[in-house]
Amino acid sequence: MKSGEEALESYSFGVKRNLHKFYGQCGSSVFFDPRMEEFGDAPPDLLGVNVRMFQGVKVEELDVVHVEDRHPSRA
């Protein structure tokens, strides 16, 4: 993706908990934002980003730590 946010489309589904942004021309998911105002309880520093959209990033080489049931709403 070489354009700015103006090239992105938005959608949400189900209970509409997260706002998903995707590139309108090809449908590639870019990020999701759980900080929608209607749900003001999400941490302000939380944003899901599709790192596959970054040039030069090899997902299989990332140091990933999987954590289950750590969302603040489940505490």
Image (cartoon, rainbow, N blue to C red):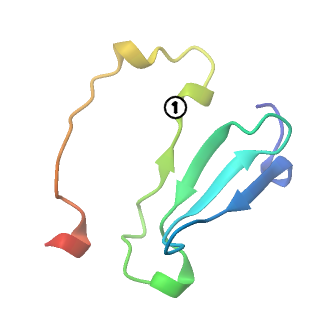
Q: In the rendered image of this protein, does residue 45 appear above or below residue 24?
A: below
Q: Quadrant of the N terminus?
A: top right
Q: Residues within 10 Å of mark 1 (few under 14, many from 20)?
A: some
Q: From the viewer's side, name the closer residue of 45 and 74.
A: 74
Q: Is residue 69 left or right of residue 3?
A: left
Q: Is residue 60 left or right of residue 70?
A: right
Q: Is residue 72 left or right of residue 22?
A: left
- Measuring from the top left, give residue 26's x and y in whole percent: 80, 34
Residue at position x 41%, y 62% from top? 45
Q: In the rendered image of this protein, does residue 63 appear above or below residue 73?
A: above
Residue at position x 81%, y 31% from top? 2
In the current view of this chain or complex, which residue is farthest to the front?
A: 14
Q: In the rendered image of this protein, does residue 48 appear above or below residue 66?
A: below
Q: Quadrant of residue 70?
A: bottom left
- Measuring from the top left, give residue 38's x and y in whole percent: 53, 86
- Measuring from the top left, give residue 66's x and y in whole percent: 21, 38
Q: Amino acid at mark 1?
A: Val
Q: Quadrant of the C terminus?
A: bottom left
Q: Is label 1 in a helix, a strand or a loop?
A: helix
Residue at position x 17%, y 50% from top? 68
- Measuring from the top left, give residue 52's x and y in whole percent: 55, 26
Residue behind mark 1: 51
Q: How many numbered marks are there? A: 1
Q: Quadrant of residue 62?
A: top left
Q: In the rendered image of this protein, does residue 49 appear above or below residue 52?
A: below
Residue at position x 49%, y 75% from top? 15
Q: From the viewer's side, name the closer residue of 9 and 35.
A: 9
Q: Is residue 73 left or right of residue 49?
A: left
